[in-house]
Image (tube, rainbow, N blue to C red):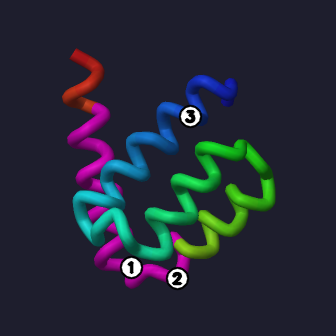
C-alpha cells in the first residue's frame, strides 16, 4: 500500500473508532499517533490496541468503516 492509501485507510479506521468507542480511548490515541508519525512501532502499538478490543466492538468498527468508505467512494 502506498503511504497515501495507508493514511486514508488509517483515517477511516480512526474516524470509525472515534464514532464507536470515543476519541479519548487508548485505541483512538494510538491510531492518531500512528497517523502523525508514520512510525512502524506506532502502527504496531495501534494494532495491538485494536486487537485488545472485544471482537464485537471490532466488528462494529469494521462495519462503520465500510459504511464511511462507501460514502467517500461516490
Q: Marks 1 and 3: CB-CB under 8 Å?
A: no
Provide the residue designation for mark 2. Answer: 52
Quadrant position of residue 36: top right
Category of crowding for the residue at label 2, using alpha-carbon neighbours closer than 10 angstroms: few (below 14), some (14–19), many (at least 20)? few
49 above or below 67?
below
Residue 35's x, y, as percent? 59, 45
Q: Residues within 10 Å of mark 1 (few under 14, many from 20)?
A: few
Q: Characterize the local packing of mark 3: few (<14), some (14-19) or many (20 or more) Cα atoms within 10 angstroms.
A: some
Q: CA distance from mark 1 to mark 3?
A: 24 Å
Which residue is at the front of the view, 68 or 33? 33
Provide the residue designation for mark 3: 7
State how far apart marks 2 and 1 are (Cα).
Answer: 9 Å
Whether residue 57 is in magenta: the answer is yes
Say which residue appears at 39% left-offset and 84% top-offset.
54
Q: Give the residue at x 31% y 75%.
A: 57
| N-term mark: 1 or 3 | 3
Q: Secondary structure at mark 1?
A: helix
Q: Quadrant of residue 3?
A: top right
Q: Which mark is residue 55?
A: 1
> Image quadrant for the N terminus?
top right
The boundaries of the magenta stretch are: 50-69
Q: CA distance from mark 2 to mark 3?
A: 22 Å
Residue 7 location, x and y as percent? 56, 34
Left or right: residue 36 compared with residue 27: right
Amino acid at each position: 500500500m502506498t503511504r497515501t492509501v495507508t493514511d486514508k485507510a488509517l483515517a477511516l479506521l480512526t474516524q470509525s473508532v472515534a464514532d464507536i468507542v470515543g476519541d479519548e480511548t487508548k485505541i483512538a490515541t494510538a491510531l492518531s499517533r500512528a497517523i502523525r508519525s508514520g512510525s512502524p512501532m506506532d502502527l504496531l502499538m495501534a494494532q495491538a490496541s485494536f486487537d485488545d478490543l472485544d471482537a464485537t466492538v471490532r466488528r462494529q468498527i469494521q462495519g462503520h468503516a465500510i459504511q464511511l468508505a462507501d460514502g467517500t467512494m461516490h
